[in-house]
Image: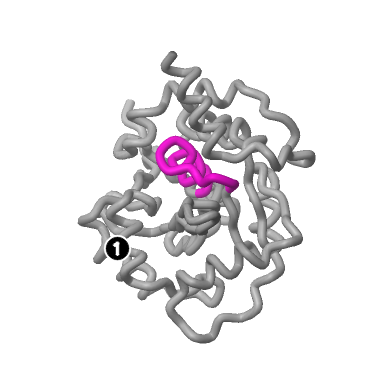
Amino acid sequence: MSSNKKEPKTYYIRMSEKVDIDRIVEFYKKNQHSNVRQRDLDILKERANHGSIVIIEDEDKNIVAASISYSHTVEENGVESVKWVEVGSTRIAGLNGFPGVFDLMTTTQILRSYLVEPPENCFVAHMEHDVIQNLAERLGWRKIDDSKDIQNASDKTINNTDIKDRSDDWYRFGVEGLPIMAKYMVDAWKKPVLTNEKTGEKIKISFEKSSLIKKFKYNIENLSKQDYGSVDKPDLSKGIRRHRDNWLIRRFR
């Protein structure tokens, strides 16, 4: 007996490649939003080439969502280092109403950056709305009070002149949250179907084009089983970069 059940559309999540830059720029140009600040084109090109932009594409390779990781370099005692990695420019234009898309994009960025280009200190993000803040807190983000240095570093990547005061609504993500993110990722590839709460429409998120999963699936599964402490009582002396380096030593000893 034949079935009339409609198969859900498939969307592919992956990190950017150099050839994606024109489509990424066009996506942000067509889908401008007051909460997504315009960034310098040279920075976008560098981030795309570096694989630091997560994108979701439909079956026709149209970008429907994107988010960018920005490395903020600070010089201390004559030495430059990436102190923070900012998760920003998150824009979801074609998958609104499907809970889990924001989570997937953030999780992919954090885990990829942790494994490939970790910051010395922590991950940061500027999130203004309650809905996004609640989603982020569930994944291990926590609000920070003293954000002046972070805001100054972030403002250097913005190419427009109407920079407003962004001293509020900054969040950090540290070592303690890594197992939360990893567990969410494991659950996501085991249950890849998302349902629109209003329409009931279902879509499938595919990781088959994701080099992150191909190369680090086992490592992410292992990370999901760890316990690095409470996100509500973080040990601020534990930097992401040192933790990643020690983790690598243990994994490949």
Q: Using residue 37 as the reference point, say whether residue 46 is left or right of it.
A: left
User: Label 1, on which residue?
Assistant: 45
State which quarter of the image contains the N terminus: top left
Q: Residue at x 46, y 54 (%)?
A: 80
Percent x, y of residue 94: 42, 61
Highlighted range, magenta: 106-122
Q: Residue at x 64, y 72 (%)?
A: 166
Q: Residues within 10 Å of mark 1 (few under 14, many from 20)?
A: many
Percent x, y of residue 100: 55, 46
Pick whichever, 154 or 105, lies toward us.
154
Q: Main secondary structure of the magenta part?
A: helix
Inspect the magenta stretch and tell me whether residue 114 lies in it.
Answer: yes
Question: Is residue 160 shown above or below 211?
Answer: below
Percent x, y of residue 211: 32, 36
Q: Residue at x 37, y 36 (%)?
A: 212
Q: Seen from this angle, which residue lies furthest top?
A: 253
Pick whichever, 210 or 96, lies toward us.
210
Please name the amino acid that badge 1 sits on: Lys
